[in-house]
Amino acid sequence: MARLHTHYDNLKVTRDASTEMIRAAYKKLLQKYHPDRNPGDSEAARIVRIINSSYAVLADPIKRNKHDIWIAAQEQTHPPTASRLSEFKGSKAPTSPAAIGFAQKLIQGIRKLTFQMAPW
């Protein structure tokens, strides 16, 4: 499973952020993506809607508590991918000497062509 995306991620704050930090992040993002600063940009308008909904949840203590409970339940049901990466240590295949030699020859060939074609 991919990393869980939350309202905290939308506002680019940590989960233990204070309400003042959340408000400051909201204002900063809103100034950046506000439709008046980005006229006709549908992507900016979409981002503003996401920012507004995230702030509505995180600014209200009851909604924020419910969101935190939901995050905890999701993390227990689906552990983050990073914790499972330790199972695959050493599984990356080593690069063969032939592949390294080929890459070096390719770079040298490109350099030769570049210098031969140079007008000076």
Image: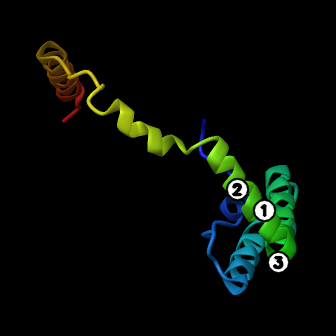
Lateral position of residue 70 relative to residue 75, left or right: right
**Residue name at image x 57 percent, y 43 percent:** 79
**Residue name at image x 63 percent, y 77 percent:** 17
**Which of 60 and 74 lies nearest the eye of the viewer?**
74
Q: Quadrant of residue 44?
A: bottom right
Lateral position of residue 39 relative to residue 92, left or right: right
Q: Identify which amino acid the numbered label 1 is placed on.
A: His
Lateral position of residue 66 relative to residue 5, left or right: right
Q: Which residue is mark 1?
A: 67
- x, y percent for residue 66: 81, 64
Find out whether the residues at labels 1 and 3 contact each other: C-beta distance under 8 Å: no
Determine the secondary structure under disc 1.
helix
Residue at the top extreme of this rendering? 98
Categorize mark 3 by other alpha carbons within 10 Å: few (<14), some (14-19), many (20+). Answer: few
Location of the N terminus (image quadrant) = top right
Q: Which residue is mark 2?
A: 71
67 in relation to 94, above or below: below
Residue 61's label in the rendered image is 3
